Image (spheres, grey):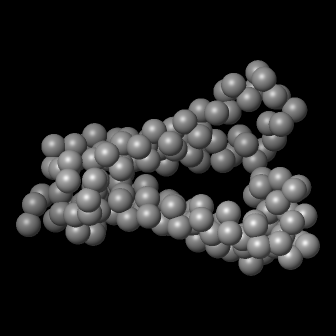
Amino acid sequence: MSEMRSTGNLPLITAGISTAIASLLHIAIIFGGGDWYRFFGAGEEMATMAEQGSMIPSIITFAIAAVLMLWSGYAFSGGGALPKIPLRRTALTLISAIFLLRGLILLPMLFMQPEQVGSFWIISSFICLAIGACYTIGTRQVWEQLTHG
């Protein structure tokens, strides 16, 4: 058993837990309905569609939840808590970049659309930066153990 598997990688395990929580939160939003879509920043259009019984918000939100759960699996695999899965190095690099970019989108928004920047955008951007940092640090720590396949 490798050292990575026996000791785990705390940043990637933290990233995996955080991403799994985000996934489950998205599932809860589907059941919470329009008010939950509004509270979590999905916008009035998504909230209204959910209240009118449209399946579109649920489908979009479920797809996001599924992607987040997949990403969580990659974090746990890279962190040694799950068996190796294909393309870990590539996936973890891309996931790191996506979370960091999502967090950094706040900066241009502050200059280009400051009226759109409310507490949701500020809080969610910092959360994404923190999760992205966990993915990045953890991936860097196990880079040599990760395979391309």
Query: How many numbered discs?
Result: 0
Q: Give the image location of residue 58, x and y in percent.
A: 72, 71
Does 64 sit above or below residue 91?
A: below
Q: Nearer the viewer, residue 77 or 85?
A: 85
Q: Quadrant of residue 2?
A: bottom left
What residue lies at 63% left-to-right and 69% top-to-bottom? 62
Q: Quadrant of residue 107?
A: top right
Q: Give the image location of residue 140, x and y in percent.
A: 28, 40
Does 106 sit above or below residue 149?
A: above
Does 94 sit above or below residue 9?
A: above
Residue placed furthest toward the left: 1
Q: Quadrant of residue 136?
A: top left
Specify the quadrant that holds the N terminus: bottom left
For the question of whether residue 35 can be seen, the reply is no
What residue lies at 35% left-to-right and 59% top-to-bottom? 74
Decide if residue 31 is on the left or right side of residue 49: left
Does 46 sit above or below residue 148?
A: below
What residue lies at 52% left-to-right and 44% top-to-bottom? 99
Q: Nearer the viewer, residue 114 or 10?
A: 114
Q: Give the image location of residue 138, x and y in percent.
A: 32, 47
Q: Nearer the viewer, residue 14 or 50?
A: 50
What residue lies at 89% left-to-right and 72% top-to-bottom? 51
For the question of whether residue 78 can be seen, the reply is yes
Q: Give the image location of residue 84, x and y in percent.
A: 22, 63
